[in-house]
C-alpha cells in the first residue's frame, strides 16, 4: 500500500504533524530504555484490532522510526498482521517517552529501573540485579538500601533532600536516570541482616520496619548481634507497629532486656 498523509480539509485547522499509514511494520524500532510491554495489554489491543480493524490512533515515532508512544499498538498490529497509523516527531528521545507516559499511564519505579538498566546505566543495572536477589523487599526499599539511606526515606520516593549544589527530589532524580546508588555491598549486608529477623518477625519486610532498621543499622549505639541475641531471649516480643517511632520504642525495650546499662536508640 502506498503511504500517504491523511488529508486535512478544514480551513481553520493548522497542520502540525502529518499522519501516515503503512503495512511495513519492520521499519519501526523499540526505543532503548522504554518499559517492557505488557503482554495482557497487547492481547487486548490485538483482540480489538481483529474485531474492529485498525482505528485512527497513530503511534508516535522519531525520525529514526523509534517508537516514542504506542509500542503496545505496534506489537498488536504485528501479531494481527495489520498496518498502523503513525506520526513522525523529530528529535524525540526517551525523555519525551517519559513525559508522554506521565500524561497517560504513569511509569512505575520498576519501569524506570528496567528502562535505564536496558540502556546501560550502571547504577540501575546494579539496582536491577540487587532487586532480583532481594525481591522479598519492595523495590522502593531496595532503592533505600542501595542509597545506604539511614532513614529509609527513599522508600516512599517522595521525600525531598538536598545535594551540595541544588535542591532535588529523590523521585525526580530517579526518573531522570541520574540516581547513583552508593555501596551495593553494604546494601546487601543490610538486606541480609533485616531478612535474618524473619524467624522472629514474619513481617520483617514491612516498609515501616525496614525503614526503622536502616536507621538503626547506621546508629553507632546499635549492636546488631546484641539485638539478635535479645530477640532469641524474647522470640515473640517483636510485634506490628503503626510507625517508626513505635518500632524504635519496642526495639529499644527488647534491646535493653535484662541489661544494667540501658541504651537509647530513639535519638
Image: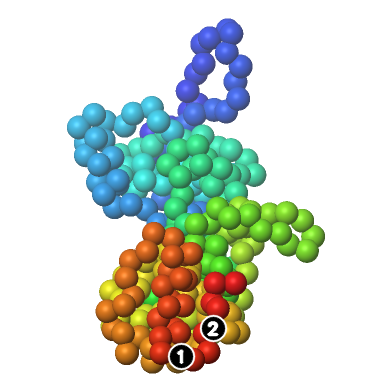
Look at the numbered discs 2 and 1 and tell me whether their residues touch, using CB distance below 8 Å. Answer: yes
Q: Disc 2 and disc 1: Cα gap in Å? A: 9 Å
The image's colouring method is rainbow
Q: Which of the two residues, 127 or 7, is positioned nearer the viewer here?
A: 127
Question: What numbered label is drawn on residue 259?
Answer: 1
Element on which disc 1 rests: loop
- Crowding at label 2, few (<14), some or many (≥20) Cα neighbours within 10 Å? few
Q: Quadrant of residue 229?
A: bottom left
Q: Tell me residue 101's x, y (percent).
A: 49, 43
Question: What numbered label is drawn on residue 59?
Answer: none
Q: Which of the two residues, 17 or 208, is positioned nearer the viewer here?
A: 208
* 163 to the left or right of 3: right
Q: Tell me residue 191's x, y (percent).
A: 44, 79
- Which residue sits at x=41%, y=73%? 250
* 40 to the left or right of 190: left
- Residue occupied by mark 2: 263
Q: Which of the two residues, 97 or 140, is positioned nearer the viewer here?
A: 140
Q: Tell me residue 228's x, y (percent).
A: 39, 88
**Residue projecting furthest to the top:** 11
| Quadrant including the C terminus | bottom right
- Which residue sits at x=49%, y=29%? 19
- Crowding at label 1, few (<14), some or many (≥20) Cα neighbours within 10 Å? few
Using the rendered image of the protein, determine whether residue 80 is visible from the camera's viewpoint: no
Q: Quadrant of residue 184?
A: bottom right
**65 to 57, vertically: above or below:** below
Amino acid at each position: 500500500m502506498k503511504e500517504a498523509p491523511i488529508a486535512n480539509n478544514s480551513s481553520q485547522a493548522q497542520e502540525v504533524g502529518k499522519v501516515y499509514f503503512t503495512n511495513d511494520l519492520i521499519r519501526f524500532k523499540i526505543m532503548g530504555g522504554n518499559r517492557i510491554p505488557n503482554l495482557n495489554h497487547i492481547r487486548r489491543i490485538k483482540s480489538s484490532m481483529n474485531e474492529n480493524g485498525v482505528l485512527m490512533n497513530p503511534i508516535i515515532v522519531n525520525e529514526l522510526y523509534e517508537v516514542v508512544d504506542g509500542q503496545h499498538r505496534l506489537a498488536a498490529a504485528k501479531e494481527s498482521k495489520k498496518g498502523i497509523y503513525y506520526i513522525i516527531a523529530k528529535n524525540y528521545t526517551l525523555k519525551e517517552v517519559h513525559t508522554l507516559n506521565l500524561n497517560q499511564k504513569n511509569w512505575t519505579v520498576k519501569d524506570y529501573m528496567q528502562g535505564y538498566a536496558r540502556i546501560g546505566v550502571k547504577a540501575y543495572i546494579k539496582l536491577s540485579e540487587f532487586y532480583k536477589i532481594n525481591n522479598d523487599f519492595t523495590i522502593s526499599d531496595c532503592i533505600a538500601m542501595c542509597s545506604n539511606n539511614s532513614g529509609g526515606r527513599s522508600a516512599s520516593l517522595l521525600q525531598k533532600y538536598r545535594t551540595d549544589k541544588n535542591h532535588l527530589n529523590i523521585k525526580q532524580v530517579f526518573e531522570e536516570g541520574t540516581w547513583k546508588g552508593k555501596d551495593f555491598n553494604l546494601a546487601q549486608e543490610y538486606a541480609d541482616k533485616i531478612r535474618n529477623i524473619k524467624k522472629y518477625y514474619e513481617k520483617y519486610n514491612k516498609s515501616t520496619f525496614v525503614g526503622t532498621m536502616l536507621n538503626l543499622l547506621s546508629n553507632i549505639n546499635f549492636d546488631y548481634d546484641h539485638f539478635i541475641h535479645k530477640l532469641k531471649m524474647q522470640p515473640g516480643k517483636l510485634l506490628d507497629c503503626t510507625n517508626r517511632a513505635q518500632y524504635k520504642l519496642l526495639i529499644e525495650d527488647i534491646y535493653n532486656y535484662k541489661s544494667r546499662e540501658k541504651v537509647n536508640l530513639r535519638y
